[in-house]
């Protein structure tokens, strides 16, 4: 449970110490991203999806490809708001770094084992036969990336200057570009950027083995190890934006326009770099990192102007509910669909599950296949929203 204020006794009087207000625009953008993530992760029918709600096949970028980098960008902004007051106190850094390490380990653990454990426990609860297949447990993943990059960037923020962080971000983007385009791939010859034969895919197979990569591909993983390098740059760009917002407390349209202008420059830079290093989510190419960070800056600047400056917050609560409990929403988006898929049901004499029954009853008869799939995804978002809304109304924030 979190509170907005605390009392400190000073002699005979009590002084109310107000905690700094949350950055509402950041909570909103995070909540919007979480809701969109659930929408694209849970279609009613994977065979019928509108193209913006699916990942690009390889090169290119769809709205769905923005989810992961937006999360990492916002992690960077949040690092500043969480740690800026503690940077000057060097004596507290040791304890703080242990806290960062603990959070990193927990997030990585959740990423690796959450889906497997949920399926296993629900299987036991529903008396469904099943076991945990550790021999084919996927090790890379988005939560793993978020946890490790959060840990690295938090320590960099604590222990290095902003100038050093800028140099590191540039080195990550340029160094990754040079590694991926110049270093030969053992067993395949010259450097290439093709699925399964690029250097990143080779490293993933060498480190994790094919049995622990994404089951749909086996030879490569969209959250591969080498691509952590540019994703650190994505998060550091969020740190730079958070530092700017925290320091200057933007209050004018001109300041917001300048921030948005930086985002546009990054977008242009990403599009130009695309000529030599194609925009690619699976590779987290340097051009993709610049493009998506630029788009995230523009979206945050626009949200900041509308919400934090102009005070337009009538539509905020639903997105704040998702944004302030992003981890809880993420876990529930795995737990609830899994639970619904394990509860048996019958539809027109055919054995199915509760979710299949809902989809076949409420969606399929009334919509085209692609629209039925979309409606099914929207229903999932609404179902996940209910418990998250309860947490929001009770002012409960699940933290790690």
Image: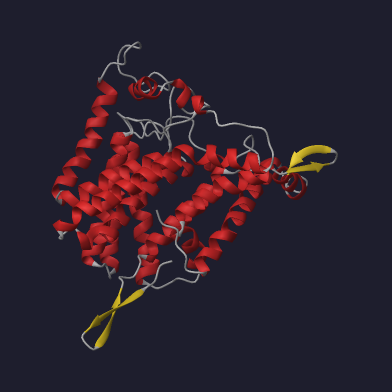
In the depicted view, which residue is nearer to us: 272 or 179?
179
Q: Is residue 69 left or right of residue 49?
A: left
What scheme was used to colour the molecule? Answer: secondary structure
Instruction: Look at 27% across and 55% down and name the residue there.
Output: 241
Residue lying farthest bottom?
12
Q: How many marks?
A: 0
* Residue 172 screen position, x and y as percent: 23, 36
Q: Is residue 85 visible?
A: yes
* Residue 381 x, y percent position in the rendering: 58, 53
What residue occupies the far right of the structure in this picture? 349
Percent of width and height locating residue 61: 43, 38
- Locate residue 169: give its quadrant: top left
Query: Where, by quadrant of the figure, is residue 353 drawn?
Result: top right
Q: Residue at x 82, y 37 (%)?
A: 350
Confirm whether residue 303 shows in the render: no
**In the rendered view, would you say 148 is above or below 192?**
below
Q: Nearer the viewer, residue 137 or 326?
A: 137
Q: Residue at x 18, y 46 (%)?
A: 165
Q: Considering depth in this image, is 388 or 90 the residue closer to the camera?
A: 90
The quadrant of the picture occupied by the N terminus is bottom left
């Amino acid at each position: 449970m979190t509170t907005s204020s605390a009392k400190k006794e000073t002699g005979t009087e009590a002084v109310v110490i107000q905690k700094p207000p949350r950055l509402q625009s950041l909570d909103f953008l995070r909540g919007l991203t979480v809701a969109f993530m659930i929408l694209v992760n849970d279609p009613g029918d994977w065979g019928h999806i509108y193209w913006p709600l699916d990942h690009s096949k390889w090169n290119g970028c769809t709205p769905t490809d923005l989810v992961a980098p937006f999360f990492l960008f916002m992690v960077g902004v949040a690092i500043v708001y969480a740690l800026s007051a503690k940077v000057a106190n060097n004596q507290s850094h040791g304890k703080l770094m242990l806290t960062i390490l603990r959070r990193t380990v927990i997030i990585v653990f959740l990423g690796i084992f959450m889906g497997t454990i949920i399926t296993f426990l629900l299987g036991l609860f529903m008396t469904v036969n099943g076991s945990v297949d550790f021999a084919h447990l996927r090790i890379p993943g988005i939560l793993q990336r978020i946890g490790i990059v959060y840990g690295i960037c938090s320590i960099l923020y604590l222990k290095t200057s902003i100038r050093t962080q800028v140099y590191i971000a540039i080195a990550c983007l340029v160094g990754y570009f040079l590694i991926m385009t110049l270093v030969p791939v053992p067993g395949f010859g010259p450097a290439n950027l093709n699925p399964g034969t690029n250097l990143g895919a080779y490293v993933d197979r060498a480190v994790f083995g094919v049995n622990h990569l994404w089951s749909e591909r086996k030879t490569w993983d969209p959250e591969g190890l080498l691509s952590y390098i540019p994703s650190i740059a994505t998060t550091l760009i969020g740190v730079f934006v958070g530092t700017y917002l925290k320091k200057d407390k933007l209050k004018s349209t001109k300041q917001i326009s300048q921030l948005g202008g930086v985002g546009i420059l990054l977008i242009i830079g990403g599009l130009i770099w695309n000529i030599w290093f194609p925009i690619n989510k699976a590779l987290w190419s340097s051009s993709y990192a610049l493009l998506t960070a630029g788009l995230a800056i523009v979206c945050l600047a626009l949200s900041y102007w509308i919400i934090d400056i102009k005070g337009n917050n009538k539509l905020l609560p639903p997105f704040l509910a998702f944004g302030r409990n992003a981890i809880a929403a993420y876990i529930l988006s795995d737990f609830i669909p899994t639970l619904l898929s394990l509860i048996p049901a019958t539809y027109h004499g055919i054995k199915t599950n509760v979710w299949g029954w809902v989809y076949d009853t409420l969606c399929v008869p009334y919509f085209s296949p692609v629209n039925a799939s979309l409606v099914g995804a929207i229903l999932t978002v609404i179902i996940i929203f209910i418990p998250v809304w309860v947490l929001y109304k009770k002012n409960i924030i699940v933290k790690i």
